[in-house]
Each structure stands twice: as C-alpha cells, then as structure tokens.
Image (cartoon, helix red, strand yellow):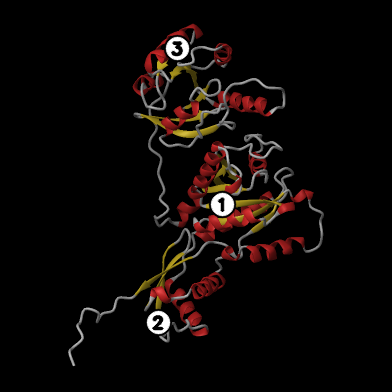
Amino acid sequence: MSFTIAIIGRPNVGKSTLFNRLVGQKLALVDDEPGVTRDRREGNARLGDLEFTVIDTAGLDEGARGSLTARMQEQTETAIGLADALMFVIDARAGLTPNDRAFADFARRANKPVVLVANKSEGKHGELGAMESYALGLGDPIQISAEHGEGMSDLYDALAALMPEPAEEAEEFDDDDIISDEDLAQRPIRVAIVGRPNAGKSTLINHLLGEERLLTSAEAGTTRDSISVEIHWQGRDFRVFDTAGLRRRSRIEEKLEKLSVADALRAVRFAEVVVMMMDAQNRFEEQDLRIADLIEREGRAIVLAVNKWDLMERKPHLISALRSDADHWLPQVKGAPIVAVSGLMGEGIDRLMTAIQDAYAVWNKRVPTAALNRWFEQAVDANPPPAVSGRRLKLNYITQTKGRPPSFVLFCSRADAVPQSYLRYLTNSLREAFDLPGTPIRITLREKANPFAHKRKRPS
C-alpha cells in the first residue's frame, strides 16, 4: 500500500530542499529566489525503513484569478487532495508570518494529518522561531535543517506514527542488462519531451493526461523543473518528463535558467526515447539542430514532433516536405520518425505515441550475427575501405555488443586509420539493411591482436 505526503508552506521555506533530501537526489530545483517551484513534483522517498511518495508543491501564495500564481496554488490544492498526510513547513529563522498563520488554517481545513516541520532550525534564531510555531495549533514542531540533514530522526518518528508497514522494494532496471521481449513489453517507456521555450511541450502532455496537470502560459519559460508523469496509452505505460525550454547558451544569463537547463539535460540522459518538439512555423532552427545533435550524442531514440500544426495552412505534400527537411538537416538520425501534432487540439497524438513505441523497438533491436556478417562482406565488397599512406586497410569482421542504442565492434588492422567518411558509409548501410531508422548507431573500432607480435625478428 502506497502512502503519499504533500510538502506545503509559503514560498522559500525550504520545501524543495526537504523534498530532495527525502528522495536522495537533487530532483527539484533549489534557489534563494522565492517561487522557483511551479508545477507539483512527485518522487519516491525513503527515510530509514519508511518508503512513501512525496509531493513537492509551489509555495502557497495568493494571486488574481486565472493568473500564473493562482494556477500554481490550484496545483498545490490538487496535491493536497491526492495526499494521505501533509508536511507543513515553516522557516524557523524568519519566525511566524501572517501567511504562515493563514495557510495553517488552510492545512487544518484539509482534514488530513499534519506534521509541522520547522526548517532551518539550526542556531539560536532557528530555535526561537520553532518555539513560536506552537501558536499555529498544529502540534509539536519537528525541528530540522533540510540542507544539513539535521533532525531527520525526529521526522522519522513523526512520519512512522502515520504510515502503514513499509512496502517491498521495487525492481530496478539497468540499461546494460539484456532485457527479454516480455520485460520490454511490460516496463514503462521513459520519454523526455524537449525543445526550445514555448514549443508547446506542457500543453501536449496535458492533452495526453486529459487534465491541466502542468502549468502552461503564453510566456516562454513557464516550466522550470523536469516534471515526470505516468501515462497509460492503449495498453502501454509511459513515464513522460516535461522539461524546461532549451535556449542557446549565449542567451542564458540567469542562474535559475542554467539550473533548469541542467535539469532538462538530466531528463534526456534518463530517458529512453526523446521527443524533440519544434514549432511548426519556425522549425529546424539552429537551436533545434543543436538539441537533436545532443540527443544523438547521448544515444537516445529520437522522435521529431512538429507542434502547432493547426496554425499551418494546409498545402499538398506538406508532410512529405517535412520528411525531406528532416533528413536534410539531421543526417545523423536519418529516417527518425517525424509527426505533425497539435498539443492544444489533440491532432496527431495517436501517431506520436505509435512513433514513440516504434522508435523504442528500433533502439532495443539486435541483429543476428550471421545476417550481420553477410551484410558486412557485401558492404566491404561493394565499397572497399580506402588505402591510407599506400597501405590497404583490412577489415576482419563485425559483431553487435549491445542494444539501447544498437552498438557494434568492428575488428580491423589499423583502427586509427579508418576514415570517418567510411564509418558513415557503414552506418548508413546498416540503417538500410536492418531497418534501423533514426536511432543512433555506435561503431567502435578495435584492432585484432597480431599472433606473431611477441616473436622477435631473427637477425639477418
């Protein structure tokens, strides 16, 4: 049985720091600027032998109806509705504020168990602020320092009194493991949605979920954290990560945006399939090409999504022109699926989800050794490697070492002399021969051991 705890409180009291401490990694962005967290974020927390789901929320704050601040509070109220218990966090160094008192009433009205957490309690000022919090009427404050890990044993005691028996450990997957077809069909596909700011990433995910789970706005840069959501689509489970928009490095000045971009890059590395989203009216711009190149270098399956298709004037052959443009601008992932979608209207969503599953299957593909070596002989006969410095290169054989992405080792006589152009020829030939469109392909060169290398040359 899972148990869910929502961390609530006014902005900048250390909720995200406590969230990171409980999940054991820096998932949520943390900064001195108030209001960094906007969307609610869930994580698997562990404290001693207690295992539970924890939700980080935006700071409780008031705003005009329909404003971003008001919608952030709606997200927090949704998190409270999903939770079994609440952790109400105050800043002990700042002492009680009128907002703390107002939101304590809000927490009481939720009619759920509340653990009062006095964060930043280290030092004399922190202790005095913690004593003030008795006035909230929420019971004894648990004095902690989320940043330094102090007071976690007291927090453990408070949470243990609320929770059921610890759940069994979940099975972990390792990308380097050989995974059976049955496991592949059952485990969720990890998908990251990336792109430039305001490409419509959050809007698309909201349509997939059928609810306003992620905040959206005409203002670029609404998403800051990489938020993961679980999606069940036509019998298949997906874990989808919404990420902050990626701009050119020269345009990133604020520390917070740098943290958001780093968080997005971590989501790409954790994902198995990355959907690169472009604006239909401004597609294949320089930053799009850089993002696609990053995905290829990280070795992730890629799907190209052209969003806001509902704003395009419908002309004949427009989709085929997209395919030609993609292969021209992104030769390193030639044949990658490209789908025209409208996250707002829901157009092309079925095609996109199908493309994600197809790209995932190709990314996991293994080529039979016999077929691989038949192809290799034909490819080398059709186009032998060039001679370098008057000496012929000898290519012996090739073998696939792993999938995810498809990776091969080519044994040859002089690995450092094989030109990159010839490796590109072999890569493109592999794609065509074994139906590996779009996925990154890795070919590593290795010199075959010389059995006579240990023998000395006899003197003449």
Q: Residues within 10 Å of mark 2 (few under 14, many from 20)?
A: some
Task: Give percent across and percent down for residue 269.
Answer: 49, 50
Cα–Cα gap, marks 1 and 2: 37 Å
Mark 1 vs mark 3: in front: 3
Residue 457 in percent (x, y) is at 21, 86
Q: Earlier in the sequence, mark 1 or mark 2?
A: 1
For marks 2 and 3, give the CA distance: 75 Å
Viewer-proximal residue among 229 and 97: 97
> Which mark is first along the chain, 3 or 1?
3
Q: Position of residue 130 (x, y in %)?
A: 43, 12
Nearest to the eye among marks 1 and 2: give it: 2
Q: Amino acid at mark 1?
A: Val
Cβ–Cβ below 8 Å for labels 1 and 3?
A: no
Q: Quadrant of residue 229?
A: top right
Q: Is residue 390 above or below residue 324?
A: below
Q: Which residue does the numbered mark 3 point to in the structure image? A: 129
Q: What is the secondary structure assignment of the residue under circle 3?
A: helix
Q: In the picture, residue 389 is in which quadrant?
A: bottom left
Does any portion of residue 449 appear in the rendered image?
yes
Residue at numbered disc 1: 274
Q: Nearer the viewer, mark 2 or mark 3?
A: 3
x and y percentages locating residue 242 in the rendered image: 58, 42
Please tell me whether mark 1 sits on a helix, a strand or a loop.
strand
What residue is at 55 percent from the left and 48 percent from the top? Answer: 191
Determine the residue positioned at 26% across, 80% down: 451
Q: CA distance from mark 1 to mark 3?
A: 46 Å
Nearer-N-terminus badge (2/3)? 3
Q: For the image shown, how many numbered marks are present on the structure? A: 3
SS class of the residue under badge 2?
loop
